[in-house]
């Protein structure tokens, strides 16, 4: 059986994300994976990643529109936007068909304002 490459995994990730399917998303991650959206603390392990997606899908209406998707070795790089004009990028380290590390960059303040969510005080 052929192991899916990084671009294939990210395409599956986008499809599950756009369905707000936290369980399907979680299955794409390794047991000890790290999802680090750099505006937040890293989330470690499948259960924590699942809980984060469930909470975020409950809080906001999110949709990922792929602008560019690149693959370089074990890495996939995703440039995305949403219907509100928010843009970002994600880096996915995929080993043996599972995401080991995801790192994402996007403007949290713009996202919170667009979604009508509270802005944390710092």
Image (tube, rainbow, N blue to C red):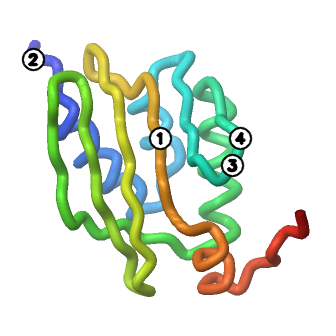
Element type at mark 3: loop
Q: Residues within 10 Å of mark 1 (few under 14, many from 20)?
A: some
* Residue to which mark 1 is pinned: 103
- Looking at the image, how many numbered discs can be counted on the residues? 4
The percent position of residue 1, horizontal first and vertical second, equals: 10, 13
Which residue appears at 15% of the width and 31% of the height?
A: 72
Q: What residue did someone put label 2 on?
A: 2
Crowd around label 3: few <14 · some 14–19 · many ≥20 (10 Å) = few
Residue with the mark numbered 4: 41
* CB contact under 8 Å: marks 3 and 4: yes
Q: Nearer the viewer, mark 3 or mark 2?
A: 3
Give the residue number, with chain letter if any, for mark 3.
40
Q: Label 1, label 3: how many angstroms apart (C-alpha)? A: 11 Å
User: Percent from the top left, x then y, of residue 36?
Assistant: 57, 39
Of helix, strand and loop, which one carries label 2? loop
Q: Image point 62% across, 72% down: which residue?
A: 60
Q: Horizontally, is 24 left or right of 34 in the view?
A: left
Cα distance, mark 3 to mark 2?
35 Å
Q: Residue at x 48, y 54 (%)?
A: 105
């Amino acid at each position: 059986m052929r192991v899916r490459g990084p671009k294939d995994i990210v395409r599956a990730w986008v499809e599950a994300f756009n369905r707000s399917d936290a369980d399907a998303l979680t299955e794409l991650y390794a047991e000890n994976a790290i999802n680090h959206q750099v505006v937040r603390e890293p989330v470690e392990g499948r259960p924590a990643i699942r809980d984060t997606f469930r909470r975020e899908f409950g809080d906001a209406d999110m949709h990922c529109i792929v602008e560019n998707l690149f693959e370089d070795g074990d890495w996939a790089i995703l440039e995305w936007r949403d219907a509100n004009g928010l843009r970002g990028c994600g880096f996915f380290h995929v080993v043996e068909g599972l995401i080991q590390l995801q790192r994402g960059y996007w403007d949290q303040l713009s996202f919170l304002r667009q979604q009508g969510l509270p802005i944390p005080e710092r």
